[in-house]
Image: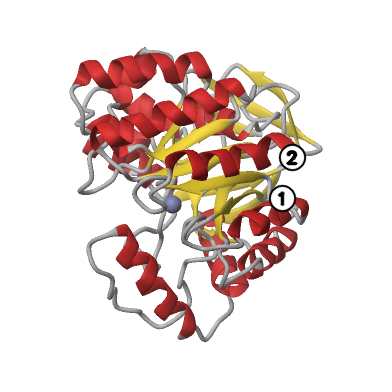
Amino acid sequence: MIRNATLPDGSRHDLEVKDGRIVAFLPPSSGEPALFVMPPLVDGHIHLDKTLLGLPWVPNRAGDTVASRIEAERGVRAERTLPESETGANLVRQVMASGTLHMRCHVDIDNQLGLRNLHEVLKIRERFAGLVTIEIVAFPQSGIARSPGTAELLDAAIGQGADLLGGLDPVGIDGDLDGHLDTIFTIAAKRGVGLDIHLHDGGEGGIAQIRAIAERAKANGLGGKVAVSHAFALGSVPLDLAARTADFLAETGVAIMSHGPGASPMPPVKMLRAHGVRVFAGSDNIRDAWSPFGNGDMLERAMLIGYRANFRHDDDLAIAFDMVTAAAADVLGLAEYCLRVGGPADYVAVEAGSLAEAVATRPRRKLVVKAGRVIARDGALVS
Ligand SMILES: [Zn+2]
């Protein structure tokens, strides 16, 4: 029994849990200090194969372009003293302790790596089965045209356990909008899987790529199974163009992921939602060759998104919270996600009086509970 819990909608209840399920929401008992109880946090965009967590500090040596970061990562990879399955497992343990129990992981695939990183992340998924869900995106980090053989590897990756097709700046990296998109949409349609495409390209050129993605989503009947990650372009063009693009995204069911970028233009989250676009959040890079920052704490991510978007009111903070909980769960297609009678007793409790306070102060996770069992307490995993 969790007594006197404040839920995300502001209501107070005692939660009765039995056999790993929530069996009742009862009137709140008084006396004990109340905890804020939320569903598990969801990381809609993480790179478990890139993180260097557990290795000695690696200075960032990349230049300022996506291409130079791709190149720098090859050098870092060659110096690793721990396999990706170990550093990635370190990251999974860290995010579990901060309340994340579901994630979408992009895995690098190119003609040098082959499916090596996929196999490393499959080991992680196996190791944490029953505790966290890990959805895998086969991600062509080096491009497709630039890395001959990658298309065949992406197709093989789906056969070996990846759940979605990825993509990367069809114009900015491959210089071939139709070639890049036709390749991944053909594989996705053949395999019956969704797509989540990294798009850093900005301005009207970026908008044209977003529209081309949405057109293909519609043509292939993949509405609701396609996402564009970053979509900086939506934040770098006049608002009326972004709004027209938003209408098309809503019509075609294409979702947008933002991590609340520090320097790049951020998609206008509130406008997108007002136009019916599903907007969700992820950590993106955590302590890797791309970024020295990040810790996988999705409450902190919600705070960063709110900070970046100039959110101040409680209603705004609720949007940031939605992006790391229900909206992300919806995009990931998590069937049983939410706190409800009969649902799994998966929840996170913190010392806060409301959702807005939890986002603003991102308190230490008092309890992380999976199927009624405490898996982390006071920010640390239980054994
Ligand atoms: Zn990414």
What secondary structure is found at the residue carrying circle 1? helix
First in residue order: circle 2 vs circle 1: 1
Which disc number belongs to residue 347?
none
Q: Residue at x 49, y 56 (%)?
A: 145
Residue 377: x and y in percent read 55, 55
Residue that carries the numbered disc 2 in the rendered image: 191
Q: Which residue is found at the position 27% from the left and 27% from the top?
A: 268
Q: Where 10 falls versus 255 (above or below)?
A: above
Residue 220 lies in quadrant: top right
Residue 271, by quadrant, is top left
Q: Quadrant of the C terminus?
A: bottom right
Q: Is residue 117 above or below residue 219?
A: below
Which corner quadrant holds the N terminus? top right
Q: Judge: label 2 CB < 8 Å from ligand 1.
A: no
Tell me residue 12's x, y (percent): 51, 20
Give the image location of residue 230, x and y in percent. 37, 41
Q: Residue at x 37, y 13 (%)?
A: 275
Q: Which residue is mark 1?
A: 158
Residue 212 lies left or right of residue 1; in this view the side is left
The residue nearer to you, when weighing 51 against 102, is 51
| Whether label 2 touches label 1, CB < 8 Å | yes
As drawn, is 74 to the left or to the right of 242? right
User: Is residue 128 shown above or below 21?
Assistant: below
Q: Is the image coloured rainbow, by chain, by secondary structure, or in one colour? A: secondary structure
Q: Is residue 356 visible?
A: no
Q: Going 40% across and 43% down the picture, which residue do you hit? A: 299
Q: Which amino acid type is marked by label 1?
A: Ile
Q: Amino acid at mark 2?
A: Arg
Q: CA distance from mark 2 to mark 1?
A: 7 Å
Q: Secondary structure at mark 2?
A: helix
Question: Residue 346 in the image: x percent, y percent?
Answer: 65, 39
